[in-house]
Image: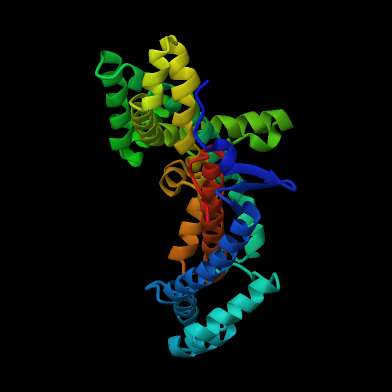
Amino acid sequence: MIRSVGFEKNLQTTHGIVEIGGVFVRKYIVKRILISIVILFFVAFIIYALMRCLPTSYIENMARQKSMQPGSKSFEDWMAQLTAMYNMDKGIVYGFFAWLGQMFRGEFGDSWFYTVPVIEKFHGTIWVSFWMGLIAMILELIIAIPLGVVAATKQYSKTDYTISILALAGISLPTFFFASLLKLVFSVRLGWFDLFGLTGRNYEQLSAMGQFLDKANHLVLPIVTLVVISVGSLMRYTRTNMLEVLNADYIRTARAKGLDERTVIYHHAFRNTLIPLVTIVGGSLPGLFSGALITETLYSIPGIGYTSYQAMVGGDIPFSMFYLTFLAILTLAGNLISDILYAVVDPRVRIS
């Protein structure tokens, strides 16, 4: 049995705490969390400053609309009134710390653009994007990893060239073009799916199961779009990792011992090929909640990607700040999870 040298030394358990490379994971996590808090502070400040400097302003749009009404005050008067009403009459630094204080108190405010509480709007749109992203990611893993392994084990064969061409085609296809092509074929020509929307016209009259199936039917084409556009990169990544592992010394040793090729590939090489892919799982955490702006827009899916885009274009600072800060937290958490998982599955890696 081939084992990594020094595994027992690098991975120990003390009072239920895994120690990797002589450093307690708990200590490492605490240090990373403290660093992440500092990073998050500066990231939030930069986001707030950029939002305040956007060329589009919700307050300006509102002041312009109100000033155009018969007998209304001037644009300048409305600007002064609305600026004071939304606490935008102070500087960026003062405004940021005021927003930060509200965040610590759990007061996220109301969305200016959607005129509902930020949490309510966020909760109403995030799960559509989450389930779309989760299903697409699972399908990507199921499709890309086996095809990447097959392409690597049959390097320079017709199978390898075919898989590589398909992967490059998926990478090269623009999202808007592929989505439009799917809608043309399956919605316009064949009539299997609706052109856009999350629900059909008779959604309210359907049973609970019928409503579920109706939503699932409307999500088929968006999910197919996400999978085809993204699966090529993961496929190529898996192929590259597998080729590196197959050229390793311990693989040649396994073959020299007389092990059959299937055992060498799927028992020894495949396991080590999956190690770098573990980091993708952790890094995919923000993507599950960030939504797919282009795909959601093309299919008129009311997900968080399209919703946040409309909020940013409309100068909606409360919603945009909450959403972007939420993504920053997920990104930092995803990187931490990736580092820990990588160190756990690969004893050669030390964290400090």
Q: Residue furthest right?
A: 15
Q: Position of residue 217 (x, y in %)?
A: 56, 29
In the picture shown, does residue 216 fall above or below 301?
above
* 156 lies left or right of 17: left
- Residue, x 48% and y 31% (percent of image)? 274
The residue closer to the viewer here, 63 or 126, is 126
Task: Say which quarter of the image contains residue 218.
Answer: top right
Q: Position of residue 133 (x, y in %)?
A: 52, 40
In the picture shown, does residue 92 fall above or below 347?
below
* 246 lies left or right of 75: left
Task: Say which quarter of the image contains residue 74.
Answer: bottom left
Task: Say which quarter of the image contains residue 168.
Answer: top left
- Residue, x 37% and y 32% (percent of image)? 241
- Residue, x 49% and y 52% (percent of image)? 305
- Residue, x 34% and y 34% (percent of image)? 178
The residue closer to the viewer here, 17 or 49, is 17
Q: Position of residue 204 (x, y in %)?
A: 68, 38
The way the protein has been coloured in the rendering is rainbow
Number of marks in picture: 0
Res. 23 visible in picture: yes
* 247 lies left or right of 138: left
The residue closer to the viewer here, 311 or 146, is 146
Q: Position of residue 250 (x, y in %)?
A: 41, 25
In the picture shown, does residue 75 fall above or below 59?
below
Res. 195 visible in picture: no
